[in-house]
């Protein structure tokens, strides 16, 4: 049974029970500036968990793309990843525990064929004003009794405190901000067998084993959260008007259980990538069940896991529009790519770094049925990854050479490596660890702060939006800039977004995401369309509206920028049939007819996956 089979079985199982299938939300949250990435299936559904009616009803099911950067240091073992798929089902004030827990058990044992004797469950033991979840305990006893298993508490059913069996985006109740929903949960673990606990390398080999001991024997494969509380301003927990079920089950982990192998990197979601890494490096992948690896084998196995995880995450991010940069989501992406290249060195892959481009096609193939956008953008993603690899490869060698010259790495040297060679802090920290050293992070942060202050001082006097001044010529080019972005989206690719701008009285400069050089024919069509809209003498109107309303009409926004609840939007054309709409503070011309003749002067590469256009008006 492969990943596509498990995903399909899960969705069909709950659709037969009255659930409407909803599409996966993008990895970059559309209306949530508080977080960089979608990290769980419930994240896009918070308004509905709090009581807002969902247009598709009270029962929902999906498979959600998720990314958790906080797990990056865990990657390298047999079960942690940064990117994963979360199978989810929700009851928005409809069914609750007595339906949910038997359904999940039925799916795992009947649909996936898991042996009930190898399933163990956990519940909330109580705390923070919430009583012990005895209801779930009784339901689980009945469920196991139905398959001939006597499930005793402390043997097959385990109660844990909030640290283990309470779920919210912020963790335990005391960490939840006011307004955040959360609740107790009940997890299902698959038992891979006592032999894993007895593995010589297990730090838990002499301890009593239980589902949450983290010895490697048990793997969490399902978590039913009973989302029924909300954190109040006074710190207390108040019951929501509706009791919700919020289920999450890691697809990769379910397949590992089906395969009866605790190494998720042996599932079909990773094996094509592992095989490529084996071929290009000439090193076989370890990680065999219950086997003892040598120190060298353990390092190369860990390296292959990190590379395959990071590249899978990178490709999925880029398919959702993220590009390598030094800010927000782009910084996380760049860190994943560079970390992959660093670990490639442990496999002897330091000469031709474009090998990472070979990993794109198999990733696209894995997800072609569930997420066809990955296949559509595969070639573009491959080019960007290879360009990023080549760019970093040059600085990587110089940076590593500098590190070899230094006896002791300190915070100042770490910042020099960051500023000069593009080494993220975490990368220098890892290289230092290999030398048996520890770098002072506070000193690094102090140097970084000094750099930020100097940058802010140097940028003083620049108007918002990249305008050099507010002269008539500059304002005209500012409006032409809006027309240019809209024309690029209509002629070249609707996924194009602005990534930077600079406008003077003489010319405009626009940076935008695109993987390849534009053809002369494309540039001519873009230029002609801008001039057509100028000739139509369209009105340019500023409107203040709620951010959500502006997003609904498709107004363009600056990538990575956080906007207030009420925003200023400039609309070119009729409000009901506009050519361009952008979040912008102005200034702009009143009508496009005053701009003049638009002319593209040059198109070139500005960075990895970023193109740049220079244009003027005559």
Image (cartoon, grey):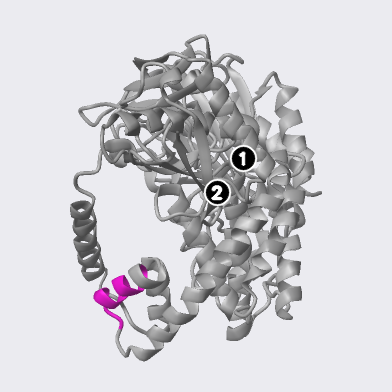
Magenta residues (range)? 409-418
Element assignment for label 1: helix
What mark, if any, has residue 523 been given in the picture? 1
Residue at 23% over, 31% down: 235
Q: Position of residue 509 (x, y in %)?
A: 43, 44
Q: Is residue 24 visible?
A: no
Q: Characterize the local packing of mark 2: few (<14), some (14-19) or many (20 or more) Cα atoms within 10 angstroms.
A: some
- In the rendered structure, the answer to whether residue 296 lies left or right of residue 336 reads right
* Closer to us: 246 or 377: 377
* Residue that mark 2 sits on: 603
Q: Quadrant of residue 22 in the image? A: top right
Image vertical order of residue 133 relative to residue 366, above or below: above
Q: Position of residue 58 (x, y in %)?
A: 58, 16
Whichever of labels 2 and 1 marks the residue nearer the N terminus, that label is 1
- In the rendered structure, the answer to whether residue 527 lies left or right of residue 291 reads left
- In the rendered structure, the answer to whether residue 427 lies left or right of residue 6 reads left
Residue at 41% over, 55% down: 326
Q: Position of residue 527 (x, y in %)?
A: 57, 33
């Amino acid at each position: 049974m492969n990943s596509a089979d498990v995903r399909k079985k899960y969705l069909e199982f709950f659709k037969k029970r009255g659930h409407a299938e909803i599409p996966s939300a993008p990895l970059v949250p559309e209306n949530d500036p508080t977080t960089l990435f979608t990290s769980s299936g419930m994240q896009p559904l918070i308004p509905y968990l709090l009581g807002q009616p969902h247009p598709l009803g009270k029962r929902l099911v999906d498979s959600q793309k998720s990314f958790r950067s906080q797990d990056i240091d865990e990657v390298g073992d047999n079960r942690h990843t940064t990117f994963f798929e979360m199978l989810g089902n929700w009851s928005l004030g409809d069914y609750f525990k007595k339906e949910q827990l038997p359904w999940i058990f039925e799916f795992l044992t009947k649909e996936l064929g898991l042996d009930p004797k190898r399933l163990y469950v956990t519940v909330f033991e109580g705390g923070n004003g919430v009583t012990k979840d005895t209801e779930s305990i009784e339901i689980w006893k009945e469920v196991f009794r139905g398959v001939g298993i006597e499930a005793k508490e402390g043997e097959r059913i385990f109660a844990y405190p909030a640290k283990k069996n309470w779920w919210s985006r912020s963790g335990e109740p005391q960490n939840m901000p006011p307004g955040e929903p959360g609740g107790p949960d009940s997890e299902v673990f698959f038992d891979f067998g006592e032999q894993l606990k007895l593995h010589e390398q297990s730090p838990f080999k002499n301890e009593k084993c239980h589902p949450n001991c983290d010895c490697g024997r048990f793997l969490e494969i399902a978590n039913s959260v009973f989302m029924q509380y909300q954190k109040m301003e006074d710190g207390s927990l108040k019951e929501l008007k509706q009791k919700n079920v919020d289920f999450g089950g890691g697809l990769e982990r379910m397949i590992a259980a089906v395969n009866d192998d605790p190494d998720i990197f042996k599932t079909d979601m990773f094996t094509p990538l592992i095989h490529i890494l084996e071929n290009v490096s000439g090193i076989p992948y370890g990680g065999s069940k219950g086997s003892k690896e040598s120190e060298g084998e353990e390092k190369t196995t860990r390296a292959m896991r990190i590379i395959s995880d990071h590249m899978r995450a990178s490709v999925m991010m880029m398919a959702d529009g993220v590009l390598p940069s030094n800010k927000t989501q782009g910084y996380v992406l760049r860190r994943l790519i560079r970390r992959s290249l660093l670990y490639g060195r442990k496999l002897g892959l330091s000469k031709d770094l474009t090998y990472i481009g070979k990993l794109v096609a198999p990733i696209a193939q894995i997800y072609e049925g569930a997420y066809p956008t990955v296949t559509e953008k595969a070639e573009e993603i491959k080019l960007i990854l290879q360009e990023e690899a080549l760019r970093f490869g040059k600085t990587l060698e110089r940076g590593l050479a500098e590190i070899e010259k230094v006896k002791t790495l300190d915070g100042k040297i770490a910042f020099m490596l960051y500023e000069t060679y593009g080494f993220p802090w975490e990368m220098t920290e890892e290289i230092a660890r290999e030398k048996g050293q520890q770098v002072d992070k506070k000193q690094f942060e102090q140097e970084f702060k000094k750099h930020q202050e100097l940058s802010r001082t140097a940028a003083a006097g620049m108007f918002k939006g990249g305008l050099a001044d507010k002269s008539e010529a500059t304002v005209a080019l500012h409006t032409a800039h809006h027309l240019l972005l809209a024309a690029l989206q209509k002629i070249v690719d609707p996924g194009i977004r602005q990534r930077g701008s600079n406008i003077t009285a003489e010319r405009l400069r626009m940076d935008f995401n695109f993987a390849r050089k534009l053809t002369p024919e494309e540039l001519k069509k873009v230029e002609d369309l801008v001039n057509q809209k100028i000739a139509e003498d369209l009105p340019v109107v500023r409107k203040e509206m709620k951010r959500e309303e502006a997003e609904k009409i498709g107004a363009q926004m600056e990538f990575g920028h956080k906007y207030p609840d009420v925003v200023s939007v400039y609309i070119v054309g009729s409000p009901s049939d506009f050519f361009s709409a952008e979040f912008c503070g102005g200034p702009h011309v009143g009508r496009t007819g005053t701009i003049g003749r638009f002319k593209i002067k040059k198109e070139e590469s500005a960075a990895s996956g970023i193109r740049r256009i220079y244009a003027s008006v005559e």
